[in-house]
Image (cartoon, rainbow, N blue to C red):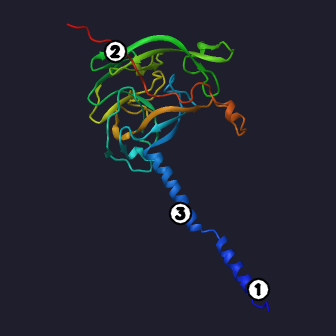
Amino acid sequence: MTTGTPAVNDTSKKKKKADDKVDWIAEIRGLALMLLAVFAFHSFIAKPFYIPSESMMPNLLVGDRLVVSKYPYGWNWSSISFHLAPRGKWRLFGSTPEYGDIVIPVHPQRDEDYIKRVVALPGDRIAVRNGQIILNGTPVEQKVEPAIALPLDANSRCDGFGFDDFRSTNADGKPICRVPVMRETLPNGATYLIIDHQNQDLDNFPEITVPEDHVFVMGDNRDHSADSRELNHPRGLLGPIPLENIGGRAEFITFSLDGTTTINPISWWTSLREGRAWSTLRPAIAERKPAPER
C-alpha cells in the first residue's frame, strides 16, 4: 500500500517552498547595518574627496581624488558626512591643525566643503603685503623656483589664469603648462609650492589677530582662491575659520583623471594621469639651520 506517500511528498514540497522564501526583514536589516557601518567610517575615520577647482594648484589639480582623514583634530558637526548634523560649537577630542596642513573647511554660511592650507593659528597676527604673508610681524619666507610642468588636458586647460604664454611640450611631445611658482616656508618648516604672479586685490590684506579656536586658511593658487582673505565675496570664507568648521585633513591622492573619462571602460584607464597616485599631501619640512652660538 502506498496511499500515504503523496502526502509525505506534499509536505516536503511545502517545507522546501517555505525554506526558499526570502526573509526580506533580515535582508533589509543587513543592508541597513552595512550602510550604517559605511556612514560611520565615512564620518569618523576617512572619506574620499574630489578636487573641483584650481584654487590649490600647483599641488592639487582638478580631477585629483583624495583621502581625507576625519580624526586628526577630533570630531565635530562638520565631521558628519553629507552635512546631516546641525551646526554647533561642540568638539570631541579637539586639537588644533599645524602650519601647512591641508584641511577641509565648511563655508560659514553654506553646507559646502572647501579645501585650503592652514597658514595662521589661533592668536597669530597675520597680514598679506604684495602677496607675501606677514606672520606675527615677520615676513614668511618665499623663494622663486623654476617653473614646473603641469598637465595640459581637459581638466587642466592652462587658460584664464595668466598661463597662456606658458603652453609648451615635454620631451615626449605631450602638451604641458609651465607655471611660475614660489616655495613658501612657514615657521614650523612646512614648505610647499604656491602660484602668485598676478597683481590682484587679495595680495594685500590688513593685519588681524586670529581669534581663539580659529585658523586662517589660504589656497596655494593665491591668484585664484576664495579663502580667508576674502571678506566680502559670498564665495569667500569670510575670514578665519572656526575649528568646529574643519571637517578633516587631506592625506594623499589616490588617483587623478584628466577629464576624458566616459562610459567606455577603456577610458577608465586611459584617462588616469601618470605619477599622481599615492602622492602624499602632508607638507615637507624644511631643514632648519642651527642658530649660531653666542
Indicate the position of residue 88 as horizontal and vertical percent values: 34, 47
**Who comes first in sequence, dot 2 or dot 1?**
1
Indicate the position of residue 180 as horizontal and vertical percent values: 51, 13
* Amino acid type for the residue under numbered disc 3: Arg
Residue furthest to the front in view is 1
* Label 1 secondary element: helix
Q: Nearer the viewer, residue 169 or 201?
A: 169
Disc 1 versus disc 3: distance between alpha carbons? 38 Å
Residue indicated by mark 1: 6
Indicate the position of residue 166 as horizontal and vertical percent values: 59, 13
Q: Residue at x 27, y 33 (%)?
A: 211
Position of residue 162 in the picture relative to residue 16 (left or right): left
Front tag of 2 and 1: 1
Q: Nearer the viewer, residue 273 or 194?
A: 273
Residue indicated by mark 3: 29
Position of residue 221 in the picture relative to residue 141 (left or right): right
Q: Work out whether 93 lies above or below 216.
A: below
* Mark drawn on residue 288: 2
Disc 2 versus disc 3: distance between alpha carbons? 57 Å
Write down the quadrant of residue 220 in the picture: top left
Disc 2 versus disc 1: distance between alpha carbons? 91 Å
* Amino acid type for the residue under numbered disc 2: Arg
Dot 2 alpha-carbon crowd within 10 angstroms: few under 14, some 14 to 19, many 20 or more: few
Q: Residue at x 69, y 30 (%)?
A: 270
* Amino acid type for the residue under numbered disc 1: Pro
